[in-house]
Image (cartoon, grey):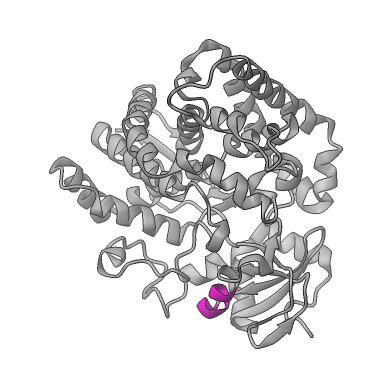
């Protein structure tokens, strides 16, 4: 059993490459080693990168033969061991079933108007005639939406305002460049032992758990929000979830997710492609549905996925990429390379939403939300949220990019964001 070839430089240098130039480095590795190669990154371990759809399919359909692995060492200390994202089977599926109703079906339809109202209120606060960064404004917007999913009608109560403030402060701390660099070189233990991290995280935990304790003393509401679902959930022995488990699930849901980054990228790409922007606005003005906006969302997630890889751990030996890989191997279907492969996406660097009107996305060539049983539970919700926000913003204001050149890709704490944070002006 042997891993595919890959760069032979020391692990510390590979960590430097992953931190500073991850996406170009992935592209150079595929050019040299092909669709399967191994990275050996300090504090991250050995990863087998996969850029062939057949290999990706084997991972996604493997079921309980693969387990969770961290694509980002920050996630362990941030989310906690009981988080649905970090749980192995069968715990993962049990937790997934608890909150699934909040992100699918009728819940999505019910929340569509709420998303529009939140977007309308956010847009009304934007300054006219002066530059401002769109990504932080999208973080505010998506936080407000998820607060309503998690806390339901209680989200507007003033007692939750401190939680909003502390979540914003935590996001800001995590995205400070010096902290991103420290995490990459010092690993997750640095976060676990960082007094500054705990000062930012503790108020979030305290406020979230204070709301849980209040809710436990009240009757279960008719329309269940996520907090109510978690409080009502029972283990197989009939016991409720403990406070540490509730903490981990709430922090997982409330932490700054990739939707804000994807929205910032959607506007960044639209504003630099006038014909695409005009077509999106025409669809909105003519009230022709959202087929083109849906394609804009899919193309944004293809060209600018918030994370470049999906990471899994083999729990059993498996033959992948022509090699017999041992149990314990970390395998990483590479979103970035699949989404830019000209074999599946002609003219792959061009932002062209029309491609998704012509051909539906492939199950194993369009994977911004991962795949298999661990596919992002909020994927349908995130796409609806993006379309609703795009529709409201494009109908309400005339945004202009401050610089006509496209923004570079920058590594943030959780995702890959616009390098200038989506710098725009309201015209």
User: In the displayed structure, does residue 273 sit left or right of residue 27?
Assistant: left
Q: Report the residue at 15% width, 47% height from top.
A: 288
Using the image, determine if residue 152 lies above or below residue 293.
above
Q: Quadrant of the N terminus?
A: bottom right
Residue 56 covered by magenta stretch: yes
For the record, the magenta segment spans 52-58
Q: Position of residue 233 (x, y in %)?
A: 61, 35
Q: Residue furthest bottom?
A: 322
Using the image, determine if residue 154 lies above or below residue 281.
above
Q: Report the residue at 39% width, 37% height from top.
A: 107
User: In the displayed structure, does residue 106 sit left or right of residue 9?
Assistant: left
Q: Residue furthest front?
A: 237
| Residue sitting nearer the eye, 237 or 34 | 237
Residue 72 covered by magenta stretch: no
Using the image, determine if residue 151 lies above or below residue 179.
above
User: In the displayed structure, does residue 109 sit left or right of residue 169?
Assistant: left
Q: Position of residue 47 (x, y in %)?
A: 72, 69
| Residue sitting nearer the eye, 181 or 148 | 148
Total number of numbered labels? 0
| Residue sitting nearer the eye, 97 or 336 | 97
Q: Position of residue 398 (x, y in %)?
A: 27, 36
Q: Report the residue at 20% width, 47% height from top.
A: 289
């Amino acid at each position: 059993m042997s891993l595919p070839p890959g760069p032979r430089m020391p692990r510390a240098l590979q960590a430097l490459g992953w931190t500073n130039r991850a996406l170009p480095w992935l592209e150079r590795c595929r050019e040299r080693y092909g669709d399967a190669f191994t990275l050996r990154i300090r504090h991250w371990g050995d990863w087998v990168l996969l850029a062939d759809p057949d290999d990706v399919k084997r991972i996604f359909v493997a079921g309980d033969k693969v387990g969770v692995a961290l694509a980002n060492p920050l996630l362990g200390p941030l989310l906690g061991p009981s988080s649905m994202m970090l749980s192995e089977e069968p715990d993962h599926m049990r937790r997934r079933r608890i909150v699934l109703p909040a992100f699918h079906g009728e819940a999505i339809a019910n929340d569509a108007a709420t998303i529009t109202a939140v977007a309308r209120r956010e847009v009304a606060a934007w300054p006219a005639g002066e530059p401002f960064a769109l990504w932080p404004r999208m973080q505010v917007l998506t936080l407000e939406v998820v607060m309503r999913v998690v806390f339901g009608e209680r989200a507007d109560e003033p007692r939750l305002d401190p939680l909003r403030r502390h979540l914003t402060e935590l996001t800001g701390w995590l995205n400070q460049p010096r902290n991103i660099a420290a995490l990459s070189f010092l690993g997750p233990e640095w976060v676990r032992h960082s007094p500054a991290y705990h000062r930012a995280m503790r108020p979030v935990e305290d406020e979230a758990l204070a709301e849980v304790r209040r809710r436990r003393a009240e009757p279960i509401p008719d329309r269940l929000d996520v907090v109510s679902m978690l409080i009502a959930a029972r283990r197989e022995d009939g016991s409720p979830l403990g406070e540490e488990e509730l903490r981990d699930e709430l922090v997982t849901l409330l932490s700054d997710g990739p939707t804000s980054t994807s929205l910032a990228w959607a506007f960044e790409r639209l504003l630099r492609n006038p014909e695409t922007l005009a077509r999106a606005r025409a669809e909105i003005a003519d009230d022709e549905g959202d087929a083109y906006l849906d394609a804009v969302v899919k193309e944004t997630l293809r060209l600018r996925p918030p994370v470049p890889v999906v990471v899994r751990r083999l729990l059993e030996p498996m033959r992948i990429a022509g090699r017999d890989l041992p149990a314990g191997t970390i395998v990483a279907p590479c979103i970035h390379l699949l989404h830019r492969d000209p074999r599946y996406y002609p003219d792959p660097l061009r932002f062209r939403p029309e491609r998704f009107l012509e051909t539906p996305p492939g199950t194993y060539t369009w994977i911004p939300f991962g795949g298999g049983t661990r596919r992002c539970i909020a994927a349908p919700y995130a796409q609806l949220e993006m379309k609703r926000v795009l529709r409201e913003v494009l109908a309400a204001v005339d945004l202009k990019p401050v610089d006509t050149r496209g923004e570079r890709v920058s590594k943030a704490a959780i995702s890959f964001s616009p390098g200038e944070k989506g710098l725009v002006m309201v015209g």
